[in-house]
Image (cartoon, helix red, strand yellow):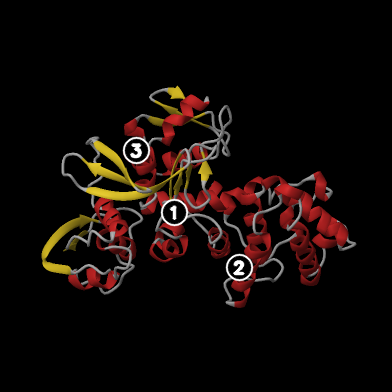
Amino acid sequence: MKRSICETAMQEYIVRAGDTLSAIAKRFLGANADWREIARINNITNPASLQIGQKLLIPVVTPPSARNPEVAMVRNTLQGVYPPNKIAISFTTVGSDVIAKLLNTGQQEPFAKTRDLGLYRLGIFKLRDFIAYGSGLLQQVQMSPSEIKVMLVTSANEGSLDAINTWDSQYLSFGIFQWTLGAAEQQGELPALLNNLKRRYPSEFQYYFGQFGLDVTSLDGITGWMSLNGNRLVSAADKNLMRQPLWALRFAIAGMDALVQSVQVVHAISRLDRFYFTPTQTLQGFTLSQILSSEFAVALLLDHHVNRPSHVIPCVADAIARSRLTPAQVAQGSTDNEALIIQNYLALRETFGGASAMTKSRERAELARQSIATGNLSPQRFSFRSNRQSRST
């Protein structure tokens, strides 16, 4: 349901680093807002001409219908109703809906649904939308066009930027790749994501997490531990604290922030550093990047690694053997060789690992093929280009 804009009521906004007109419009006017409205009001002829510190007039929107609570949550949280001074929030459950209530205003919003030991939120912020309104932020973090294409395909099989899950054995999962807190007594990938946020945007980390006592520790760039009020969360009893609806709400709201979203994207593509660019004896000392170098191949490999990380390299090795080739021959070969390897790889990965084989392998591969048909992925050898070296400097 669209909300009406009352141009006689305005609020002032100061442009920050990384802001775009699209992101500002989405933040204040809703998911379906048009940035041109803000441009018209502020006499902006070039949408790329925003300057840090520039003052903008933003229309105040009328409250959305109570029948559209998701839109209400987006509008209210991103306009600052989420309290930096820790205003009390209560939670109730009506049917399967988990409802948050701000006790100082009485405002109520359903934001998740119950399931088993906790709750889940599918989320409403999709990566494909962020690619449009957050293009300036992606340039800041030096994402290449190829990396963006691969992320779009891979994220179609994963979650939304504000997705949350607290119902399974990982206690808390968040974001497009559903990074987890980790099982009891085990490290998880979510602390590494938060550390990336803390390093790039310390003010946002403090606003969403640090002021409530949450921090990250013992990180290796891939996994780590969370701590709460100085206590490391290790045991099942410790980690159960993160199943509280309040933490799910905090993560959901953080996932609506464009800066947090940009960190998710760059953190997701950095997963390639863990397996794609590293030489391995399984491939006779070659890297996957030397074997399979098309955008299509990288999208398939990243999707597989998110789902079943330990399967990717041995599955590719088996595909090379089935093709009656060696890694050296493939690395020096043509696009035809790569296409043959991919064909055998996709056939193998459907059952590779037996009962623990990749989830919905065939359906996920079809999504990538469709991206070739629409021109959003290239099957040509060496078409994938990474900016990883630029980001590491």
**The quarter of the displayed image where residue 348 is located:** bottom right
Disc 1 and disc 3: Cα gap in Å?
Answer: 17 Å
The answer to whether the residues at label 3 and label 2 have Cβ atoms under 8 Å apart is no
Q: Considering the numbered disc 1 on the image, is that residue within a helix, a strand or a loop?
A: loop
For discs 1 and 2, the disc positioned in front in the rendered view: 1
Q: Position of residue 363 (x, y in %)?
A: 64, 65
Q: Nearer the viewer, residue 170 or 32?
A: 170
Would you name the residue on which mark 3 appears? 246
Q: Is residue 384 visible?
A: no
Q: Residue furthest top?
A: 231
Q: Position of residue 180 (x, y in %)?
A: 52, 40
Disc 1 and disc 2: Cα gap in Å?
Answer: 20 Å
Q: Is residue 302 above or below residue 392?
A: below
Would you name the residue on which mark 2 appears? 367
Would you name the residue on which mark 1 appears? 122
Q: Amino acid at mark 1?
A: Leu
Q: Residue furthest front?
A: 95
Q: Considering the numbered disc 2 on the image, is that residue within a helix, a strand or a loop?
A: helix
Q: Considering the numbered disc 3 on the image, is that residue within a helix, a strand or a loop?
A: helix
Q: Earlier along the polypeptide chain: callout 1 or callout 3?
A: 1
Q: Earlier along the polypeptide chain: callout 3 or callout 2?
A: 3
